[in-house]
Amino acid sequence: MPYDEFNAMRDLLASLFFNGRTGVLMLLLVGAAAVDYRSHRIPNGLVLPGALYAVIYSSVLPPWPNGTILFPLAGLGLGLLLFLPLYLLRAMGGGDVKLLAMVGAFLGPDDVWRAAVASLIAGGVLAIVFILVNGTALRMVHNLTLLFRVGLLDTIGGSVPSLRISAEASAGKLPYGVAIATGTIGYLVLDRLAFI
């Protein structure tokens, strides 16, 4: 890579990391990921002040001329709605949903769905790594087969399938705050470097 291209890339990344919106968001995401990894919880004391900061910051310094408070509020609402179905299916915790809502308050409605897709991709990759490292791949395949078979039979029989697995039979619990942080930061970096 020529020296000028390297300097341009460095300057683009610096503008991302030292920005009052994206820099603070990435710090909050790294903090949430670290706490979630250790305790499998994302504290409200991190997410709620972060969302409040995003709403105030984006209202005072909107990302485009004539921007209003609707930008962060629409992003917050969309972020909440995107992962809410996964929470209702018990595939994700409430802290993960609130974390994506906070991301939406920072990024707004146009970018929060991209961050959500990137988070889901990162979550899939991290889940594969997680089960391979923990040696629970066979248990996961067994659980998926069981869920599919039971779900299909219940549906054919006209009843609502019970898609619950006991904690003892689970292949493990992935701290999804790590996936949200990895996916969102990855999206921001790739977007800033114009790779996506």
Image (cartoon, helix red, strand yellow):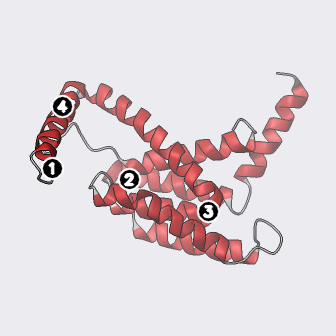
Residue pointed to by mark 3 = 109
Residue 125, horizontal then vertical, whole percent: 43, 33
Residue sitting at x 70%, y 51%: 17
Q: Eyeballing the image, is 135 above or below 106? A: above
Q: Which mark is residue 145?
A: 4
Type of amino acid at the residue the image marks with label 2: Asp
For this rendering, which residue is in front, 63 or 83?
A: 83
Asked which secondary structure carries label 1, the reply is loop
Element assignment for label 2: helix
Left or right of 41 on screen, residue 125: right
Residue at mark 2: 36
Q: Earlier in the sequence, mark 1 or mark 4?
A: 4
Residue type marked 4: Thr
Asked if the residue under mark 2 is in contact with the one under mark 1, i.e. CB atoms within 8 Å, the reply is: no
Is residue 54 at all visible to an observer of this figure? Answer: no
Residue 161: give its label.
1
- In this rendering, the label closer to the viewer, 1 or 3: 1
Front residue of this view, candidates 110 and 94 = 110
**Distance of mark 1 from mark 2, alpha carbons?**
30 Å
Residue at 81%, 75% (x, y): give it: 66
Secondary structure of the residue carrying numbered label 4: helix
Q: Residue at position x 87%, y 22% from top? A: 2
